[in-house]
Image (cartoon, grey):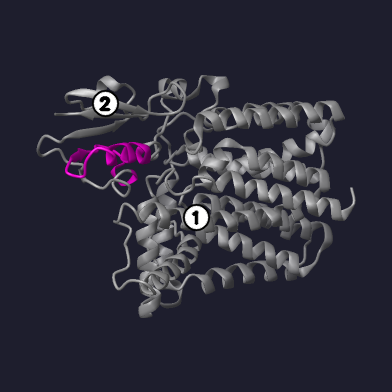
Amino acid sequence: MKQNKFKILAGILISLFILIRIISLGPDISNSDAARWHRRSIMFLNALKRGDFAETYQRYHPGVTLMWLNSFVKQASFSYQLTYTKTPKTLENADYYPIQHGISKGVNIIVLAVLLGFQIYGLEKVFNKKTALIYAFLISLEPYMVGINRWFHQTSFEVFFGFTAVLFILIWNKEKKNLQIALSAVFLALSILSKVTSLVLIPVFAYYLLKTKKIKPALIFFSTLALTIFAVFPALWVKPVYVLSQIYSAVTSAVGSGSVSIFYYFIILAFKLSPVTLLIFVVSLINLKKIRNENILAFLGTLLIYLLFLTISRKKIDRYSLAMIPYILTVSSFYLTKTSIKAFKIILISATIFFIYISIIYHPVYSAYYSPFFGGAKKALDLGVYENSGEYFAQAAFYLNGKSRNMLVYIPDNIESFNYYYKGNVENILEKEPDYIVSSLDKDRKSDNDLQKCGQLDKTFGPGGFNAVYVYKCN
């Protein structure tokens, strides 16, 4: 394939990646942590303005990349509003929140698209052009990846920065250029600053650095890693011991005997991957001899590291599986380059048709996706792995906004996924009879019979025939 054609196709796929993720952004979903990250970004920005760098430490995650990026968005929004009003709107304004929320998420998606460009470049270097383009196509259409990329959260940054870092260490292993190892360290630093669990990737980098039996590459890598983390995280400038001890404490407390089956992430991947992707990956593993090479083994090894770490972790959440998906897609993409043209076309057409089908059911709340091949959300609920992280609360809020603003709505769970969209009064402690109750199903709330009710069922929201959120009218 000629380079110009490759660049054009890469550009088209990056545009597809953005388009799918940016349509209906803002009113779609405020994930359960979104409002907290908005508030943390504001506090981060205010701390920078005051020169109170210690206060830029907001949470052990630490979410620094997300807060830096959104600080610029918040400042730009604030400055723009001051050009036409003396009282800028805040996040608590239900008309303004979807706009600010959508812009914030849109900027995040642009950053992810830029990182996808780096990944396409990296996969071309590590494998070939065809593998790179197939990967870009598959990741653009992977339903759960689309869903989490549309969240206001640090998970997507952790995954994309981390995967890009792995690609660049593999490029360096092949070409031995200092810039490549430095870029790998920068990307890893930004991944760690997004979410500290990216430290589990360190063994991958250590393996390739030790393999050379030279000290200079390791010095370049780890010095760049440390300098990037220090430079981008202002709290480390003034309180390094305190910040690092807090993060260390959070990391060590997260590892231990988990309360969920060791098969949890196998089940989650089965439910959250497209059945097309899952089929290709399983066939790839069966035919591993056909695609066996050093770099494929590196990706499988990294996938195994993530799987082991997440399995022994005390805290098991479905979105953590996102970290494994780029490695699964890479192995699958490389395998597809080894198949016949006919099989290759069938797979790509199937992936496209399946995504269109899923979009009809789930758009714009793709994070609610559970594979219909395994029984969808209903089966996930039966197995105790279904999670509602704010899905369909925005839709319930918009529905109730159309009734009256003089109503009291009781939200027992996920209140912040609802109240920033809702124009009336909201409470999460039932002190007096409300006008409406908005309840949801979850792994610990498996049946509508277990939900707080009053009066009559007024409306339900969810994908297809599955009811995820219930609106009850009380009087």
Give the residue displayed 75% in from the left and 69% down from the top: 179
Q: Would you place residue 156 above or below residue 78 in this image?
A: above
Image position of 224 with respect to 6: above or below: below
Residue 297 percent across, percent down from the top left: 75, 42
- Residues under numbered marks 2 and 1 in contact, where contact means CB atoms less than 8 Å apart: no
**SS class, disc 1:** loop
- Residue displayed at 41% across by 73% down: 79
Marker disc for residue 11? none
**Residue furthest out toward the left:** 432
Magenta-tinted stretch: 393-417
Q: Nearer the viewer, residue 68 or 346?
A: 346
Q: Which residue is mark 2?
A: 458
Give the residue type at disc 2: Asp
Which-is-in-front pick, marks 2 and 1? 2
Can residue 383 be seen here? The reply is yes
Question: Where, by quadrant of the figure, is residue 166 drawn?
Answer: bottom right
Q: Is residue 338 left or right of residue 280?
A: right
User: Could you tell me residue 267's position as x and y percent?
Assistant: 53, 27
Residue assigned mark 1: 195
Mark 2: secondary structure = strand
Q: Residues within 10 Å of mark 1 (few under 14, many from 20)?
A: many
Give the x, y percent position of residue 133: 76, 45
Q: Residue at x 73, y 35 (%)?
A: 332
Say what amino acid the circle numbered 1 marks: Lys
258 lies left or right of 420 = right
Q: Is there any visible trace of residue 303 in the rendered image?
A: no
Q: Earlier in the sequence, mark 2 or mark 1?
A: 1
In the displayed structure, 91 sits above or below 232; it is above
